[in-house]
Amino acid sequence: TPEKDAARGEVTTQHASALLLLSYLVLPSTSMTQFRGLNCFPFESEHAYLRVDTSVWCDEKSDEYSTLLQTDIPLIILYQSIPFIWAALLISQRHRLNPGYKNEQASRRKRDRDPRIAPLRFLFEDNRVDRWSYDVYDMWRRIAMIGIIPFAPLKYRPILGCGLAAFSVVVVQESQPYHDAATNALAVASQWQLCVTYFIAFALMSGSLEATFELGILLLVVNLAIVVTALFLGIKKNTERVLNEATIFKLRHALTIEKGIDKKKFDAAWGGLEQADPPAAVRVLEGAAELARRHTTKPVQGKHLKDVEALMAEAAKVEPAFHAAIKKLILEAGGEFKQGPLKKVERVVEKMENDYGNDHTRVVDIVRDSGVFETMDGYGKAVEKLLSGDCDIEIVRFKDRLANGGNSYGYRDTMMNVKLAGSDHVGELQLHLKAIIDIKPASHRLYGLLRAAGWEEDNLEAEGREDDAPGVAADASASASAAVPTATPKPTSSPAEETADRLLLGAAASAKVAPDQGAAESDPVAHVAALKAIIEQKDSIIEQKDTVINRKVLLLRAKNNEIEQLRASMTTNNATGGLNLQGERRPSWFARAAPTPNGNSQGQQTQHVRRPSWFARNAQSSQQQNASASVQPYNSQTSA
């Protein structure tokens, strides 16, 4: 059954994780023990004996040593293969280990929640997402320190240890493998401690220093100072990092909100054009999709162009004819032709070096034009001319940026690389809609900021808000919880109001429709129409829910007024009741149940005090009881 399969998989994951973790914990100490079994100490008699057991003679003729080698060497090979297994497992999951979000914190949270890599979590949990393999290197470093260096001659061990520690200082300092700054600082400090210790050992062996008690105290103080300094600097860096992340998050969040506002403007402009002429919109979307399907060749200039000077010369030569052909196409379709300036040689060189690896033939927008259309019908005519070939240009590559809502901030157009018939020089043509391009200048600055920071495709919701800065989400949660009263009485509505509310909410829930993904991929126009229908339905749902909420608010206000009136009434009753001489507040029925002139209390039993409302409903029964019982005089203690 699926339940048993899920349980079996969970148990397997837990056992695999425990086994890998156990191997991580025992590998350093086990490796040290195994390598000690091969470490022999030579004596002046030219015989060598095992350092950990001098009764074993390190010689091929020794049966004990031969048996030790036959057992120890295979185990060394087996245990030293464990880091290779870790490395292979990590490499196979490298895309999950580094999700690739621009924000480190978002990537790390995404990684830590992935169940597929949970058994390997002990290897990367403390590391940055782009340093997922650091623990494998660190394990080999530790094995080298405790297992391999002891094999070196005694006089060279301090030098090797100091050199390996210095190399580790550089690696940790430059790579900063841990996401916590304090951990990075402590890692660097530990490598400096090793380096200082090996250096002192080298000085002692060379005779530069003498082993004294004072030297030991000095070494202890130096090590403690390194640890304390590293911890202080690490905490300081952590504090600065948290503040920086919070500031960056606020900036990104504000820019993303502005980006969403711009997207709504572009969507509204596109929706207006689409509603004005739905058939033309269908022609445009279908034609653009077909052109994008047909023309996917990567555009490059001719191979005969040996350098940038030749490229610029050819562009200047082709420019007049290129502009004339594009102008004819745009005007015949009813659009406005806008001639682009010839790209300057400085910009061509910059683009060639930064974007195309010094390949000048990949710069294909030196000659460029654009067309602007006020209606979908004119845009559709231009697309149809390009489809039929009824123009003087040939399309090399076509980019459809109309489908799927345009780019990440809603801008829509088409861009194509074209060339004249009989020419190899490639230029650029863009087709715009006036209602959309008129909005572009206002959003272009925002897009420039996003692009400069590398956030042009940011979508906080797509990352599950993983990039919440530390403290921001907590503050928001705290403020939200503070705004909610802890003991608010639940309002009740009349049956008619509850029935109306249920009908409204039920209608709203039944109106939710999900778009057909298959239809969306095959028919972009249908997808757009479905999305529009969903938006309209959701707007209707929101309006209906607002009606319900407003009704609840009015009901709650009425209940609050009733509560206030009740409180005022209770305050008045308490004020009129007053206090008796003994400091006890009289009950509200006391005046009504006061003794009569003859000393009797009407309806008053000796042991029980009954309210007049109960007495009134049971008058007949009370009279019968009073007739048969003796009437007791009023007693204040008994009544109390």
Image (cartoon, rainbow, N blue to C red):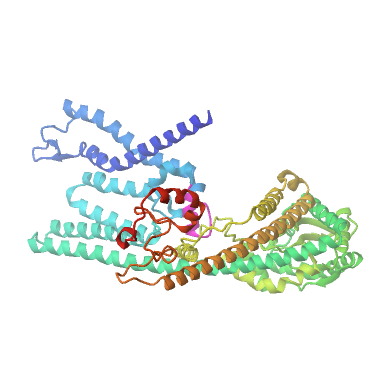
Q: Split into 4 quadrants, where in the image is the C terminus?
A: bottom left
Residue 106 is one of the magenta-drawn residues:
yes
Residue drawn at the location 67% of the way across and 69% of the way down: 348
**Which residue is at a point 27% across and 67% down the rendered structure image?**
229
The front one of 8 and 438 is: 8
Would you say 387 lies left or right of 470 here? Answer: right
Residue 391, relative to residue 138: is it above or below? below
Residue 44 position within the rendered picture, expressed as x and y whole percent measured from the top left: 8, 41
Residue 396's x, y, as percent?
A: 78, 56
Visible residue check, residue 367: no
Is residue 504 left or right of 621 when viewed as pictured?
right
Residue segment shown in magenta: 98-113
Across and down, in percent, residue 581 comes to 31, 72
- Work out whether residue 332 or residue 280 is closer to the camera in this orientation and state it: 280
Number of dots carrying numbers: 0
Q: Is residue 90 above or below residue 416?
A: above
Residue 547 position within the rendered picture, expressed as x and y whole percent measured from the top left: 68, 61
Side of 87 relative to 30 (left or right): right
Left or right: residue 86 versus residue 345 is left
| Front-most of residues 64 and 185 | 185
Does residue 142 belong to the magenta stretch? no
Instruction: Using the rendered image of the protein, determine whether residue 533 is visible from the camera's viewpoint.
Output: yes
Q: Quadrant of residue 389?
A: bottom right
Single out the residue that lies furthest toward the top: 63
